[in-house]
Image: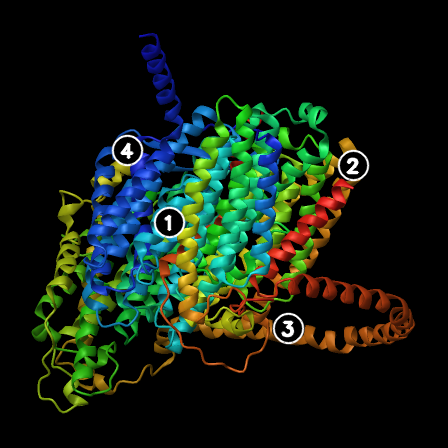
Amino acid sequence: MEYASQLNNQLQNTIALLSGYWPEFIIVIGLVVTLIIDLIFFNKEKNSNWWIGFVNLVFLILAFTKQVDVYSYFSNLGEFMKLVLLFAGVLFIVFSLTQTHQTKKAGEYYIIFNGLLIGALLIAKSTNLLVIYLGIEMMSISAYVLSAFSFNKNSAEASLKYLLFGAVSSAFMLFGMSLLYGFTQTLNINDFELLHTVKVIGDLPIKLAVFMTMFGFLFKIAATPMHIWSPDVYEATPTFVVAAFSVIPKLAVFVLLFNIADKFLVFPEVELLLQFTAILSLTIGNFAALWQKNAKRMLAYSSIAHTGFLLIAFFANMQSFVFYGLVYLIMNFAVFGLVKVVEQKFSITDIEQYIGLGKKIPLIGVLFVVALISLTGLPPTAGFTAKILVFSGIWEKYLTNHNPVYLSLFVFGLFNTVVSLFYYLKIPYFMFIKKSNEVILNEHKSSTVLTYLIGSLVFVLILCFFLPNSLMDMIYSINFAQ
Amino acid sequence: MNQEVTILTLTSSTQLSLVVLFLPLLSFVIMNLWSKNRKLGSYVSSGLFFVNFIIAVFLFITIWNGEPEHSRWLWFEIGSGIQFTSGVWLNNLTVLLLVLVTLVSFMVHLFSLEYMKDDKAYNRYFSFLGLFTFSMLGIVLSDNLLLMFVFWELVGFSSYLLIGFWFHKETAAKASKKAFIVNRIGDLGFLVGLMILWSNYNTLDLTTLISSAEITDPSLTLATLCLFGGVIGKSAQFPLQVWLPDAMEGPTPVSALIHAATMVAAGVFLLARITPFIPIDALHVIALIGAITAFMGGVAALRQFDIKKILAFSTISQLGYMVMGVGASAYDAAIFHLITHAFFKACLFLSAGAIIHSLHKFSHDNDANFDAQDIRLMGGLRRSMPFTFWVFIVSSMALVGVPLFSGFLSKEAILIASLSMTKGWQVIVPILGFGSVLITAFYVMRMLLIIFFGENRLSNIINTSYPSFSKVSLLMKIPLTLLAFSSLFILFSPNPFDGSHSWIINGLSNQLPIEHHSVVPAISVMLVLLGMGLAYAKFKPSSKYIQQIHSEPDYKNLWQSLSFNNWHLDAIYDAVIIRQAIRIADGIKMIEEKLINRFINYFAIFNVILAKILGLFDRYIVDGLVHFSAFASNTIGWLSKNIQSGKAQTHIAWAGLGILMIIIWLIL
Amino acid sequence: MITLQHFLIIGISLFSIGLTTVIIKKNAILVLLGIELMLNGANVNLIGFSTNDPQIQGQIFSLFVIVVAAAEAVVALAIVVRVYQYFNTSNVDEPKELKG
């Protein structure tokens, strides 16, 4: 009897706790439902692609609304970022829905994306090593499959490379985790007393363990030196999937970094590692981007550089990080969407082939200019506001603790912003300024709805520059103390 | 002076009015997105407009003669305390115009379904109609002058789009440009007026202005006259009426929309909105301008041969009446005339459109090339297009102001009001007003006789014995019938001879109804009869003039030339303004070439010397740095790029090496 | 008596052997085996450490790792088959069209 009532209590507690996990449940249910629909209807109905995506979208939106409730209850950073991740998921599916006739194996496409999203949501919430590992693996394995979804030679090659690299780095992370478990005898990061353990074991093994774990995280945010996979994958993967890759895992792992910061960053070396990574990512991302000829590959390097900026924002303060993350999400979806539109219209992704396109498709051209200006971080776009917030945050940090590393973060950030101008403006340069010898391109139809969607995203970018208050108010509703 | 702005929350009526405002915009968006199925899209948008009309009628029933509803919210804030509001103000005037605009807009949609069905840019046309209506509804609903100005400009812009709808025709492109530029000149006045009002009262909110403006303030005279400048542009008053005849280049249903319910009505509506705080001196100027416009428009209509031009000049003339009415402190009568005019003029334009449509089709079918709008080539249409004939007759009678028709009621009301202006020079106002009645009767009768009576003159230029025209389709008939019915007295006043007790005037004015005159109707009916009689004498089918009309030149003497060329206003503007402006521009260009360039040359030589010196510095010191940094950036980029060898295992090895290096660097 | 030390030695050996295999071997299957070895090295560690843990969380963790590794192997083999279709080789060195 004693045991039974105890068990009953525990079950009750568990169920009560689970109410915070409704969004994840809904996505899982959505995943299963999509799977079943896929099995029954796929290729039997005419519009099965569209219906599968639509059903999935409905579940995601449901999860989103549920998450709004959860957030209003907890209102901490993790729940807020989950909201953002779900928003990115909705955006991805809406984008994909505009291309249903082209999506191959639509059912699997959406199901696997849902897997990626669940992994991201788990990471954003958890501080348990096992759950973190499972979340990261869920994201990674889904990502390996998704990166093969172009169904061509390049895509197969990219996914193989991605898989090998990812598996090795997750093995590194797992090994680090096993050591951490051994040193602390617990999987819950909140119970870690690393400084205390140092006295018993000595600091080298622990730092090694922390480092190895960290490298697994760095792999997911594509920060140097774990960035090498990303250009190949970005180039060969379907463009919308790239947009999702560049945002969802990244933001999720950053939230994880925030969650574990007070336990892991007790060592100055770990902090230094991240700062060093930030500078390296910025420099390598930006300089390598200067050389690129393929728009998607260039954006891959640019997103490596943006990881650097996000890391700087991580060190500045949470508010500026959240702002930067949100703006980054919107600009990335906009710019990859535009790349997709051009790809679909003229089947080109090389920047030099963009020559003279500004006259043919002026609307797309203008949207491109605004989105790229925002990525560079110039006014009048939200990218500028975000960069200002980050830089002023890091400068304040420097003034309070006089750590020269913060100064160098600041200087490198500014310097790299200038460098990035050169490659971002290459696209408008080719589209509008460079004279072309009338290359005749076959023009296909592209989705008008997609253009309007991107247009509204770009509009938001401009709006957030002029009226950043609404966004800031949302961000200040987060309780950062937790 | 930071006065706190009171925020007025939304009521159900104002929310509904916002729906009315945004439905046309929705139609605009839908028609833009929905480019695939042209038929369905246009039916959906017409459906939206019908719904819109129904909502407007519902609003009308709730608000009319009831409590006005006003919602206002903070729009934006500059610095601290300088607050701009926006909002919706529903009173009798608003809901009346709301019904008018939505109704005429809906009619035009219905008519266009048939009229435009073969046009390539069918969807674009309907989407522009939506935008146009949206902007006009915005003017009607907004509760402050700034917001109104925004929509005012939108109306200008969308009219530009619609007038230049067939932009591949050069005349259409020119006409749209002209309308746009002439309107801008007027809008400059509007803007200056806004600035003066803001600097004096710190608000542009209409209700606040009405309650706080002191009628004796001399700056107010200036401000309202500046606002009137905007009206002159938009409502085509003297001296800016030149754009309206050219605006005929747009599709005919659009002309109906512009002339009846939207664009030109905006000016009169603005005057009606601000009339409580227009000082008396400004009112006199307004009345004078209105009377002059009425007269000039009427005279210009006398010798036109293009059916749409006749109607255009008659619109100018009628707008002159309305403005004159406002100037004679009878804005209620002016709005009354606006409403009746909207119906009969829309009807006239749409039936003219039906005539042009079938003539055009005829010329197309028979490979005959002639101008489908030239009345010299019409004649005898009474028999071939009986339906259009009756509709046209009804609405023309309303335009002339024959008793039993709506135009009579409203025109009398304005004329009666104008009789209050008899002091000194003001006497010219009623004189011109009555004179225009005579002229109107004359040119309308002329138009009717030439178009519908006598023999068909087409046979003079092509070899068909008796041309048969296509029937007017049902989709065109419905709006025509409805509009023609609305041109009868019955809708507006129970007494066909007395407009002053009409429910519109009762609803709009707070003062007691004007005394019923019996002299004024008598005089004007006599004038009408005189004008029609004179016209009949000259243009009766058996007259010599009519027999020769198909070979009649545009004009033969000075007076005819004056009328045909609209008082030579275009030529005068060309000589006085455009050519002078070009001359001044040339002069400035010369000054620049001779004077400024020379100075710049010397400056340039100096610069070259300086540059030589700097160049040396540059070559040896700055360039060195630049080359170095370019080299460095290239090297870094090249290095980081070449880590990417393409082999999976090398990647892993590089990453492993990176990890190792970082670990070693950090720990050691 | 098998002590923690033995566990750790085996764990780190497996891990290192796995890493070496991944970098050196050319055949994709062998590379995947190397990855399995690395994961199992971590598994051995986890199990070894859980001897001191009354809740044996480490052992549970290692069970999960095995499942994940299986999933990963499935995906990996599928991808290798794809690569084989396009490149006619299971050599991980051959596909090198994406670079720069």
Q: Position of residue B419 (x, y in %)?
A: 33, 47
Tell whether label 3 touches label 4 (CB within 8 Å).
no
SS of the residue at dot 4?
loop
Name the subunit of mark 1: A
Q: Nearer the viewer, residue B441 or B605?
A: B605
SS of the residue at dot 1?
helix
- The answer to which of marks 1 and 2 sits earlier in the sequence is 1
Identify residue for label 3: B585
Name the subunit of mark 3: B
Name the subunit of mark 2: A
Looking at the rendered structure, whether the residues under marks 1 and 3 are on a common chain is answered as no
User: Is residue A413 toward the left or the right of residue A403 in the image?
Assistant: left
Badge nearest the viewer, 1 or 2: 1
Tell whether label 2 touches label 4 (CB within 8 Å).
no
Distance in Å between CA atoms under marks 4 and 2: 83 Å
Badge nearest the viewer, 4 or 2: 2
Identify residue for label 4: B512
At label 2, counting other C-alpha atoms closer than 10 Å, the crowd grade (few under 14, some 14-19, many 20 or more) is few
Distance in Å between CA atoms under marks 1 and 3: 68 Å
Residue found farthest to the front: C1
Q: Amino acid at mark 1?
A: Ile
Identify residue for label 2: A403
Identify residue for label 1: A112
Location of residue A372 with respect to C58 vertically, above or below: below
Residue found farthest to the top: A2
Observer able to see residue A380: no
Q: Amino acid at mark 4?
A: Leu
